[in-house]
Structure formats: C-alpha cells, structure tokens
Amino acid sequence: MELSPYNPTAIFYNALKLKNAKILEEDETGIMIQIHDSQTALVLQSNLETAKIWFDKHPPCSFDLISLYGDALCDLFYRIYVMQKNCGQNEEKESGELDRLEPRDKADLINKRDHYANQSDLMSQKTTMLFSKSKLFVWPENQKAEFGDFSLIFKTAGLSDYSWIRSHYDLVSNEELKEDLEDGRLFIGYWNGQPVGFAGIHPEGSMGLLEILPKYRKQGFGKQMEEYLIQQLVEHHLAACCEVFCDNFVSIALQKKMGLKEVSENCYWIELESES
C-alpha cells in the first residue's frame, strides 16, 4: 500500500519511517502494523474480507491495544468479537442480539461463531473492551511549517524530568512515559525560565502528550507547543498529524485553527483488558 504523510495513512507512514514498527500484513488496499516493544496494532483495510483473514492470522487477543481506521472496519470488529462474545453468554442474550441483525449479517455471525469460539481468542482471554473514537488531523501537503517567533524556549525532556511530568500527566503508563523520555520524544516549553507545559510525539509518530499547567493556560502556549512539534516533524520529513478524541472540542478547534486538515474517516482505539 502506498503510504503518505498527507492522508489517513500518515501515522503508518511515520511509524515505519521512524523504524518504530513492523509490518504484519500489507496489500494494495490496506496495512497492519505492530508498534515495536508493545502489544499495540494499527489496522487500515478497506477490503473487509481481507480484514477478516488478517484478524484470523493475528487474533486481537494477542494485543492490548488496537487502532482501527474507518467506520466499516470497526463495525466488522464489533460484529465478530463483541457480539460474538455476548451471543455466547446464554441463549436469551444470543436470541436478542441476533434478532437485531439483518438476515445477511445474522447468517454471517452464526456461520462464524463456532470458528471463533474454537480459537484461543478474545472471547476467552479478554474480558473488557474499551472503545474510544477519535478524529485524525494531518498537516496539508505543500503548506510550509513556518511560524512567528516563539516566546517559549524549548528543551528536550529527559529522565530527570520524569517526576515533574508524571505529576501533571497520567494518560500514559509509567513505562510508556519513560520510553518517550529515553527516546527524546518529549519537549518542555519554558517562559521566563519557568516550565509552562510539555508536548511530544507518540511511538507511532503522532503528536500528543500536550499539557499546559493551569496557571499558564489561555495564553497561547498550547498553540506554540504544537507549532513547535509541527515544525520538528516537517523538518524531518515526517507527517505532522494527531488524533483527537471526538468529544475534545477544544482540541479539535485548535487543530483547525492551526491549519491541519481533518480526515473524513474516524479512528477507533480499542483497549483490550484481561481478567486479573
């Protein structure tokens, strides 16, 4: 599949160019990768029959986090795994779930049920699935990443900054944060010698980890932090892109104000939790 920094393949483009992922599957209509040193998989595939084959070869139960690009792909995952799991709980539940399906989908689910139930798969190993819907924004092609003078001074964060960053940000695990710091993917912004916030690049190559300390908010520092990330990525010939939860209206407005282009297809992050 041809990857580009300016379309829905932007994150795949970054992850592979950064040599931070391996290709599990690829053809002319899609790609599936795994982020190195993690149980995270990213999948983009417009051919749903091919997607089924890929899920057979790489069962979701082998991952802790899966990112699916496109509504149709998420619907497929839901029909196979979520409804399959629910239908297997008892006959009354199964009947209720199946009755809500169209005949074609009902037949497909019934035919697939025994196949998936016989695998050491998601239904037996994962007890919780947390779905998060997000929007993908990318920096437009041929648009220069040239911004005005920054009032902030930026420094690459290191492990010595771990405790301070951890005290202000808890959306990634301790291990992930340490890896981000070790790899030099986090940056701190200083104003008048004081740290006002930080931002960074996720392992898959998207912008994020943006946090401005409460006393410094609404002063344009968040915009500067993101401008700095965009500049860094573009200068290194990478995609300046980010994913924003659909209910984060403030961040969505910021991306549009910054000039990033919203990709039409939604992205779904599915966190798979095992029974403790």
Image (cartoon, rainbow, N blue to C red):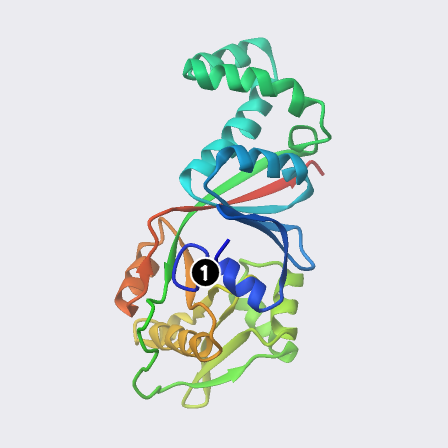
Amino acid at pointer 1: Ala
**Horizontal and vertical percent for residue 189?**
45, 81
In the rendered structure, the answer to whether residue 121 lies left or right of residue 238 reads right
**Horizontal and vertical percent for residue 122?**
65, 33
* 110 shown above or below 213: above
Q: In which quarter of the image is residue 102?
A: top left
In the rendered structure, the answer to whether residue 48 lies left or right of residue 71 reads right
Judge by depth and name the residue closer to the eye, 185 or 266: 266
Q: Mark 1 points at which residue?
A: 10
Q: Residues within 10 Å of mark 1 (few under 14, many from 20)?
A: many
**Horizontal and vertical percent for residue 78?**
50, 31
Can residue 264 be seen here?
yes
* 111 shown above or below 213: above
* 117 shown above or below 70: above
Q: Quadrant of residue 176?
A: bottom right
Q: Residue at x 65, y 74 (%)?
A: 182
Q: Is mark 1 on a helix, strand or loop?
A: helix
Q: Residue at x 43, y 13 (%)?
A: 103
* 17 shown above or below 100: below
Q: Which residue is drawn at 61% across and 17% down?
A: 89
Q: Residue at x 42, y 54 (%)?
A: 8
